[in-house]
Image: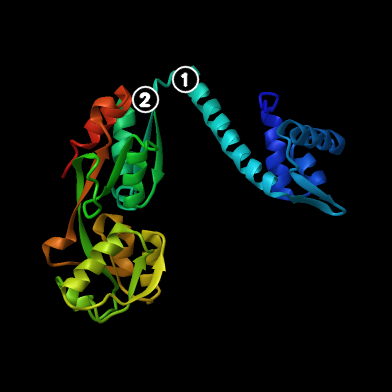
């Protein structure tokens, strides 16, 4: 089977037809006439040797082949778009791209300022950053999806070269009217009789808190789970529970008027974020430069 006659416009039409399941709407979105769109889809079926759609009176229904090939088409179009972006960057003087995955703690607390400093000194480098759970970040570096990863210290990374990136300190966040609000510091055990607002399953922070609670012989009573630090703050402010967050992730204005951050006792509440790579010797010059920069910022 020779697929070279396929072109990007036909693949885009296939994706649009799969999304709309209606030929007229797909043609409109592709800025084609219905007859031209129909001809292109028929040509796709001829070239692939597969029936991609069942034509119905009120639209199109994808076959199994249509669903599978539409998914391949999406990936091809995404790759083509990235290629176009890269070509534009190179034409405008960008010398290299670095793929960075980082957990939420790093993204919220440290990376905005750190990357601004780095890019100020290296304006011809393009950094593609993706926020991900620590485990996903480690996996992305191991699989080659990312050049560099930043993740929490309680996530194993035996196959990566790692260095300390930053340190942070966990605090208990409570409404200002909460019974714990006037305490100068608390232990985790002091908090475990109250309902918690926590991050979703899979986060390294939730695992850290859960493991620490288990060592006290108590369970963490999670009432609500959300996907962001901001979501935790909003839920706590609404009186739906208390939470544990890195102090640097809490907006200072919230601590003035609405919430109280209470220091947590115990070494477990002090965290190290690590920066890791699969093989420092095989990094591109731009990625190696960023790795050196990030691994010399520990505070």
**Label ID, residue 10:** none
- In depth, the one of 12 and 183 nearer the eye is 12
Residue 261 figure quarter:
bottom left
Image quarter in which the C terminus is found: top left
Q: Which residue is mark 2?
A: 123
Q: Which residue is mark 1?
A: 90
The vertical placement of 42 against 91, above or below, is below
Query: Helix or strand or loop: what does disc 1 sit on?
Result: helix
Q: CA distance from mark 1 to mark 2?
A: 13 Å
Residue 193: % across, % down: 25, 82
Image-based side of 92 in relation to 133, left or right = right
Residue 80 figure quarter:
top right
Count neighbours of disc 1 (C-alpha within 10 A) and say few if under 14, some if 14 to 19, many if 20 or more: some
Image-based side of 60 in relation to 143, left or right = right
Residue 160: % across, % down: 24, 40
Residue 176: % across, % down: 29, 74
- Residue 261 visible in the displayed image: no
């Amino acid at each position: 089977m020779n697929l070279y006659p396929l072109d990007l416009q036909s693949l885009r039409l296939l994706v649009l037809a799969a999304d709309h399941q209606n030929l007229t709407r797909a043609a409109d979105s592709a800025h084609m006439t219905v007859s031209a769109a129909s001809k292109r889809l028929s040509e796709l079926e001829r070239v692939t040797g597969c029936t991609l759609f069942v034509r119905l009176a009120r639209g199109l229904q994808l076959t199994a082949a249509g669903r599978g090939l539409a998914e391949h088409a999406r990936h091809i179009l995404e790759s083509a778009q990235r290629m176009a972006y890269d070509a534009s960057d190179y034409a405008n003087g960008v010398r290299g791209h670095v793929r960075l995955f980082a957990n939420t703690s790093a993204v919220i607390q440290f990376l905005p300022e750190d990357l601004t400093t780095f890019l100020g000194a290296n304006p011809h480098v393009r950094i593609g950053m993706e926020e991900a759970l620590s485990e996903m970040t480690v996996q992305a570096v191991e699989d080659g999806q990312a050049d560099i990863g930043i993740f929490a210290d309680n996530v194993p990374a035996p196959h990566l070269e790692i260095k300390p990136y930053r340190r942070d300190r966990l605090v208990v966040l409570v409404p200002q009217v909460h019974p714990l609000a006037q305490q100068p510091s608390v232990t985790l055990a002091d908090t475990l009789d109250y309902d918690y607002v926590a991050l979703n399953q899979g986060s390294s922070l939730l695992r850290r808190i859960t493991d620490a609670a288990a060592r006290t012989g108590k369970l963490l009573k999670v009432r609500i789970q959300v996907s962001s630090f901001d979501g935790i703050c909003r839920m706590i402010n609404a009186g739906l529970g208390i939470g544990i967050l890195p102090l640097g992730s809490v907006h200072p204005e919230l601590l003035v008027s609405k919430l109280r951050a209470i220091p947590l006792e115990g070494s477990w509440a002090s965290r190290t974020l690590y920066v890791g790579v699969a093989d420092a010797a095989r990094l591109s010059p731009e990625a190696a430069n960023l790795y050196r920069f990030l691994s010399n910022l520990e505070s």
